[in-house]
Image (cartoon, rainbow, N blue to C red):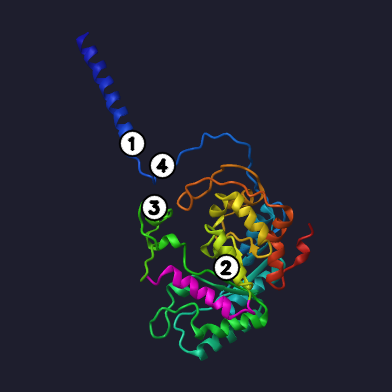
Amino acid sequence: MKKSLSKIKSIILSVILFLTTLSVIAQDMGFEEYNPTSTLVVPGNEITKAKFPFIDVHSHQRDMSVEALNGLVADMDVMNEAIMVNLSGGSGESLKEKVDNINKSYPNRFAVFANVDFEGAKDMEWGKKAAKQLEQDIKNGAKGLKIFKSLGLRNKDADGNRLAIDDPRLDPIWAKCGEMGVPVLIHAADPKSFWDKMDSENERWLELKTHPRRKRTATDPAPFEQIIQEQHNVFKKHQNTKFINAHMGWNANNLEKLGELLDEMPNMNVGISAVIAELGRQPQNARAFFIKYQDRVLFGKDSWKPEEFPTYFRVLESNDEYFPYYKKYHAFWAMYGLNLPDDVLRKLYYQNALNIIPGLDSSLFKN
């Protein structure tokens, strides 16, 4: 009997110790692991198909084979994506091959932007040569020019110095786009928080902790403000060229400032790729911005993950409250719907892109 009681006591003590250990572990849990399920019960539904056909002006597809295009179109049809703009078109034969594949299979469902390799820029003759190649790429079917963030962050000139976005040796490239009537979609720098001190006040702390290579400093490679100003200098200098500022120019968290920049630079437009989390946490302010600047904002997603598009549709179209975002390290807050008017949605989804990007098939958009 005594042995049985002793065994029972031992089991009870083990259970208590186990529960205490679990409690300590829970209390010691870090922010990385803390991801609670909301208990809030409010009306709302996921939107898996956009209300109107849309043009995604910010996609990246390395594989543009006919087989790959078949798969892309199947996914696009499900969500009502009419046209995909592939910003990773490359140049020369690589670009021509992509355009040829599109023309063979889905000539009205895809567009390709050309790219320029800025590494080793040397002199004005280098710039003219790059512009000449770009001209040929446009004649071969490119609908615009995409500038990656490597310009301003990583590209170096022939002397090994950081190549600034507003370097005069690049002027022939921007001018060529204006001359040929094609837009420049440009991604400059990264979120300002990547340059800020990595501490408890930094909203991107978790992203920087999980992706440490994204951390920047004033000398690695240059201050955030300097890189952004270089971009604006190009916009102002080349007023005959239309620019699409990717990621809302990293000012989606300060729409008042972004509005001032749009007022200052009439040839600048903005794309919403990768900043839907900023818009979804300020529904009233963002709604007012979209209405005021309805002719200057374009839909874009960036990374091709069809399962993430419904969050974009829900933020833009619905009046839902407090629904989850899909990537905690980008946003640990919930989303709210902007409930944009139909005429604004149409401009955002396709009309503005049709006005800026030449040669897209407008017959795909009848409503």
Residue identifier under label 2: 261
Left or right side of 266 for 150: left
**In terms of secondary structure, where does tag 3 sit?**
loop
**In terms of secondary structure, where does tag 4 sit?**
loop
**How much space separates mark 4 and mark 3, taking CA atoms?**
18 Å
**In terms of secondary structure, where does tag 2 sit?**
helix
Mark 1: amino acid: Gln
Disc 2 packing (10 Å; few <14; some 14–19; many ≥20):
some
- Total marks in image: 4
Q: Tell me, yes or no, if residue 63 can be seen here.
A: no
Q: Earlier in the sequence, mark 4 or mark 3?
A: 4
Q: Earlier in the sequence, mark 1 or mark 2?
A: 1
**How much space separates mark 1 and mark 4, taking CA atoms?**
11 Å
Which residues are drawn in magenta? 220-241
Q: Earlier in the sequence, mark 1 or mark 4?
A: 1
Q: Position of residue 110 (x, y in %)?
A: 67, 66
Q: Position of residue 260 (x, y in %)?
A: 58, 66
Left or right side of 360 for 227: left
Q: Nearer the viewer, mark 1 or mark 2?
A: 2
Q: Is residue 51 above or below residue 256?
A: above
Residue identifier under label 3: 201
**In terms of secondary structure, where does tag 1 sit?**
helix
- Find the residue positioned furthest to the left: 2
Residue identifier under label 4: 34
Q: Would residue 236 be counted in the magenta stretch? A: yes
Residue identifier under label 1: 27
**How much space separates mark 2 and mark 3, taking CA atoms?**
27 Å
Disc 4 packing (10 Å; few <14; some 14–19; many ≥20):
few
Q: Earlier in the sequence, mark 4 or mark 2?
A: 4
**Residue shown at 68% from the left, 59% from the top:** 349
**How much space separates mark 1 and mark 3, taking CA atoms?**
22 Å
**Mark number, residue 209:** none
